[in-house]
Image (cartoon, helix red, strand yellow):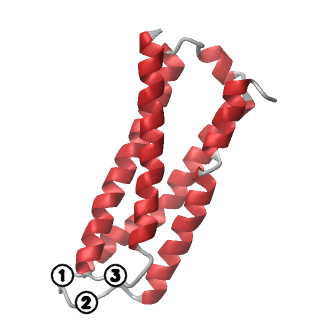
Amino acid sequence: MWLDALLAYLHFTAAFAFLAFLSVELYLVRSPLDAGRVRELCRADLWYWGCAAAVLATGLARLALGAKGASLHLDAWPFWAKLALFGLAAAMSAAPSAAFRRWRRALGDPRSAVPEAERAGARKRLMATIHVAALIPLLAVLMARGLP
């Protein structure tokens, strides 16, 4: 019972941090980007992907070691929908993450800035990603309540 509670806590904490760092990225790309802001963005992105890995690892641990057992989760459509949305959010995050790294390499000169069209495009992709990711907790609630 204690293990199940600990795994749930770690999973929820990782999920909240995942969404928090995605929000930080959105905050950082809201205005023109200079070299310093891009460095912050890359650092936040590293934390974002670390949290994504933690969400996946703790989720798999809950699946394997949790009190409810794997069959309860594997037979529930919300579980598969959560997994699909998580994968979609990760796939949608790949392009902005690659852009952040590209911008960091390109901004050796502290006076240079990211082109506005690229910044705006990354923000739109991140906004779409956070909307997709925001549906995951809803599916978790449906799954926890056993709703069809």
Which residue is pictured at 41% across the width and 64% down the height? 25
Q: Tell whether 14 sits left or right of 131.
A: left
Q: Are circles 2 and 1 on residues that touch, CB within 8 Å?
A: yes
Q: Element type at marker 2?
A: loop
Whichever of labels 2 and 3 marks the residue nearer the N terminus, that label is 3
Q: Give the residue at mark 1.
A: 108
Q: Give the residue at mark 3.
A: 33
Nearer the observer, disc 1 or disc 3? 3
How crowded pointer 1 is (Cα within 10 Å; few <14, some 14-19, many 20+) is rated as few
Closer to us: 90 or 143: 143
Instruction: Looking at this view, name the residue that lies furthest to the left.
Output: 109
How crowded pointer 3 is (Cα within 10 Å; few <14, some 14-19, many 20+) is rated as many
Give the CA separation, mark 2 to mark 3: 9 Å
Residue 112, label in figure: 2
Q: Element type at marker 3?
A: loop
Q: Please determine whether, in this image, residue 4 is positioned above or below residue 81.
A: above
Give the CA separation, mark 1 to mark 3: 13 Å
